[in-house]
Amino acid sequence: MRTTNVVLIGAVLLAGAGLAGPAAWCASAADAADGADAHMHHHMMSGTMRSTVDYTLPPVKLVRDDGKTVSLIDELNDGRPVILTFIYTTCTTICPMVSQTLEKLQSELGGERDKVHIVSISIDPEQDTPARLRTYAARFDAGPEWQHYTGTVEASITTQRAFNVYRGDKMNHTPVAFVRSAPGKPWLRIDGFATPAELLSAYHDAVASN
């Protein structure tokens, strides 16, 4: 993993979310930026922290919400831009907020929806069966371009580690989204609660720079 650019965008108040506060995800975001080169720069904006990072996808198998076992590499490298998050279905704080954002993003994408691959990977695969994921996806009107994945505990942890989001206990997870324009391109990592407009802008910027 190589971090090439970091953009720090303030802190958000996680009121009523049952979290310690902004420091929880800010500390994790700072950890994610470890190894950044000397050219990193910081820029204050609103509520999120951005970094551009090269991640190496692990050769793991996941189980898609339709029950099919698939290769993570093949799923993420199918040619479409990717917007990726990590969730678990029994989460009552961060995950519903992140998924609501993706639900709104689907609407804002309009006719571009079928050109994007939205990916949500479970960090609680022991509980999150494909059937549970389908039920969860239906809560947020997930279209065919938005797919949810589970798998073995080992595969889930390996994937989390590859994206530097593994925090041990699932209760320690933080809000983070990843945007990539095409296979082989770096990922834009957004720590914090990105808005639908922010994700849409990140997607358009990524595609324009491809």
Image: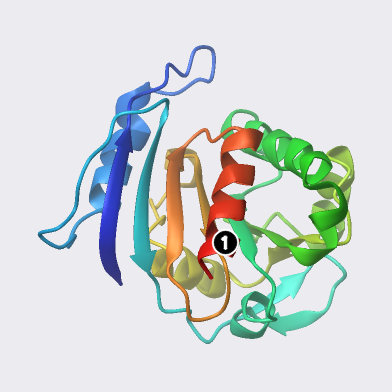
Q: Amino acid at mark 1?
A: Ala
> Residue 20, percent across and down?
37, 22
Q: What residue is drawn where x is 54% and y is 12%? A: 16
Give the quadrant of residue 80: bottom right
Image-based side of 45 in relation to 86, left or right: left
The residue furthest left is 38
Q: What residue is drawn where x is 78% and y is 47%? A: 109
Image-based side of 62 in relation to 165, left or right: right
> Residue 163, percent across and down?
43, 64
Image-based side of 81 in relation to 55, left or right: right
> Residue 58, percent across and down?
48, 81
> Residue 120, percent across and down?
67, 56
Q: What residue is drawn where x is 88% and y is 61%? A: 144
Residue holding disc 1:
208
The residue furthest front is 208
Tell me, yes or no, if residue 182 can be seen here: yes
Tell me, yes or no, if residue 122 can be seen here: no
Disc 1 element = helix
Indicate how the structure is coloured in the image.
rainbow
Position of the N terminus, as image quadrant, is bottom left
The residue furthest top is 15
